């Protein structure tokens, strides 16, 4: 064993089902690394940024094996634990970090939903203003409905793209920077034939379904 490495024997009994299900949901051979991250963060009074999903398979087996600690902070932290109580203490710490991440994920999801609602409300208000910009245009109502449909489809593609980010933090950041005003302008410019040299988004093809004149379809 090297100077910067310490091995501990970790047992997670079956009654610690939450930790076992968390471990079962992790990528193969990653449990050791995440336990290290948790202990390092705990030694610094922080919360580790870890996955927080659970596996819901019927099988729940006791965890009984070796954890190799490689970081000096984690090694020193464990050395200070009372002899004979390290396993129990580590299990409590793991649970604490799982629960903290699940709570942060829940709050981030709520923020994500709020951001989407704010975007849609702003989009609806902005798109209703566009009708007055095309007074006297030939075939106005059909073109308006085509513009609405194109803008709505593009908006929802953009929202789905934001929400497909690697985590809620990045998703919320992308949603906050989603320019729905430009999506509306580009859709109307496309349908009404006006030039727009600043188009940077890719929009879906326009459908030829029948629409009701003047109605904002889908809102």
Image (cartoon, grey):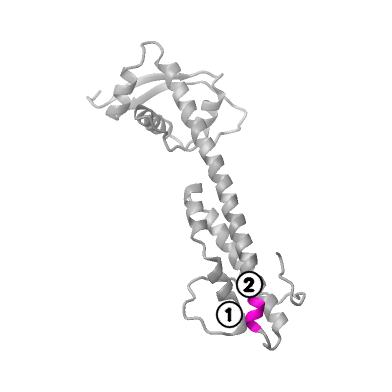
**Is 95 situated left or right of 71 in this image?**
right
Q: Position of residue 57 (x, y in %)?
A: 60, 31
- Asked which quadrant contains residue 21, the reply is top right
Disc 2 crowd rating (10 Å Cα; few below 14, some 14-19, many 20+) is: many
Q: Which mark is residue 190?
A: 1
Q: Residue at x 58, y 60 (%)?
A: 119
Q: Where's residue 47, x and y in %?
A: 42, 33
- Residue 167 visible in the displayed image: no
Is 160 above or below relative to 209?
above
Q: Quadrant of the N terminus?
A: top left
Q: Relative to residue 96, is residue 216 depicted above or below? A: below
Bounds of the magenta span? 130-134
Q: Secondary structure at mark 2?
A: helix
Q: Is residue 198 above or below residue 36?
A: below
Return the residue at label 2.
150
Task: Residue lying at the far top in this picture: please name it.
Answer: 84
The quadrant of the rendering that contains the C terminus is bottom right
Asked if disc 1 and disc 2 are in contact, CB closer than 8 Å, the reply is yes
Height in image: 155 above or below 132?
above
Instruction: Indicate the quadrant where residue 186 lies.
Output: bottom right
Magenta segment: does it hold 168? Answer: no
Q: Residue at x 38, y 33 (%)?
A: 37
Badge 1 or badge 2: first in the primary sequence: 2
| Depth order, front residue of 61/160 | 160
């Amino acid at each position: 064993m090297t100077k910067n490495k310490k091995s501990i024997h970790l047992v997670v009994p079956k009654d610690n089902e939450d930790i076992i299900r968390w471990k079962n949901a992790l990528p193969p051979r990653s449990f050791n690394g995440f336990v290290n991250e948790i202990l390092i963060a705990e030694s610094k009074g922080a919360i580790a940024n870890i996955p927080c999903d659970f596996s819901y398979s019927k099988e729940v087996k006791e965890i009984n094996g070796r954890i190799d600690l490689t970081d000096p902070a984690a090694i020193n932290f464990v050395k200070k634990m009372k002899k004979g109580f390290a396993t129990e203490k580590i299990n409590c710490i793991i649970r604490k970090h799982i629960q903290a991440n699940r709570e942060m994920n829940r709050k981030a999801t709520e923020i994500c939903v709020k951001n989407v609602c704010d975007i849609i409300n702003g989009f609806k208000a902005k798109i209703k203003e566009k009708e007055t910009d095309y007074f006297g245009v030939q075939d106005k109502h059909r073109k308006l409905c085509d513009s609405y449909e194109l803008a709505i489809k593009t908006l929802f593609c953009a929202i789905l793209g934001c929400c497909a980010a690697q985590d809620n933090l990045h998703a919320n950041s992308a949603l906050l920077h989603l320019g729905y005003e430009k999506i509306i302008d580009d859709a109307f410019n496309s349908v009404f034939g006006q030039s727009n040299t600043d188009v940077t988004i890719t929009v879906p093809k326009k459908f030829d379904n029948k629409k009701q004149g003047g109605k904002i379809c889908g809102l």
